Amino acid sequence: MTVNLGILGAAGRMGQEIASLGKDNPAFQIKAVVDRPDHPLLGQAIQPGLILSSDPAALAAQCDVLIDFSSPQALSQHLQIAMDHHCAMVIGVTGIDDDQQAAIVKAAETIPILRASNTSLGVALLDMLVTQAAKLLPPEWDVEILEMHHRDKVDAPSGTALSLGQAAAQGRGVDLDRCAVTDRAESCEKRKTGSIGFASLRGGSVPGDHKVIFAGDNERLELSHYAQSRSIFAKGALRAAQWIFDKSPGLYGMQECLTTGP
């Protein structure tokens, strides 16, 4: 079955990558590509035959699934439009706050939503491995998460790093908000047992590198993922769109997409 697809934030790096891969995939029919009203590419083709518009409501009326890689500021509007038109959503927006996350949870009562800070299948598996490692290793093993991204990335730690931290916290049965340490320069104290540390690096054109370090006495376990191209995120987002479009309302993640059938 062909999935009618709309792309929000289509003029960004990820949006253009998804459009490039999706337009030649027989599993999809890209109905429209949308970005903000003041975008300089508005009215131009971001891919052959795909003209950038600024009307997400008109897009949703034609679509089974909306893939959203736009911005936190646009997310509430996009959620409402998806609910109004009964579209499933794949949300890859990062840097969202608690209110925006609550809006996603509320919308998922009405429509199926797959929310992922990283749509790579490798990262989905990494999340699962981190949870298992954190569950099996004793609490005196320290957990540190290192991430590096391109120089233009604004939010830190990355959404993927926070997701990995949440996976570690889940494995240990603790609240990440209570044990996360994102800035040791401010705390100026020795490491507390049970804390989960984050370090963020920015530079060059790195699409996204993540490493979770479990450090015990005289031994260390490192679980890593290195993204070499944004195409892996676009491929994962398209797989997620194909997976989510006929699901019941609810909030899903890439782990379900990876481990369950269509």
Image: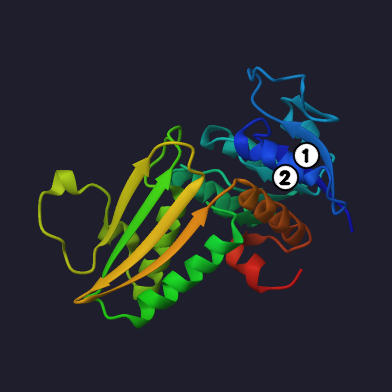
Q: Quadrant where the N terminus lies? A: bottom right
Classify 206 as above or below 3: above
Mark 2: few, some, or many residues within 10 Å (few <14, many ≥20)?
Answer: many
| Residue at image coords 66%, 65% | 257
Q: What residue is shown with label 2?
A: 66
Q: Quadrant where the C terminus lies? A: bottom right
> Residue 27, how many percent across, how many down?
85, 54
> Residue 66, how many percent across, how many down?
72, 45
Work out whether residue 253 can be spotted: no
- Look at the numbered discs 2 and 1 and tell me whether their residues touch, using CB distance below 8 Å: yes
> Residue 260, how many percent across, how many down?
68, 73
Choose top left, top right, bottom left or bottom right for residue 248. Answer: bottom right
Work out whether residue 93 can be spotted: yes
| Residue at image coords 58%, 38% | 75
Q: Is residue 87 left or right of residue 148?
A: right
Mark 1: few, some, or many residues within 10 Å (few <14, many ≥20)?
Answer: many
Q: What residue type is disc 1 on? A: Ala
Element class at badge 1: helix
Among numbered discs 2 and 1, the one appearing first in the sequence: 1
Q: Is residue 262 left or right of residue 129?
A: right
Classify 249 as above or below 40: below
Q: Nearer the viewer, residue 113 or 4?
A: 4
> Residue 155, how many percent across, how many down?
41, 39
Residue 60 disc label? 1
| Residue at image coords 42%, 61% | 164
Q: Is residue 123 left or right of residue 11?
A: left
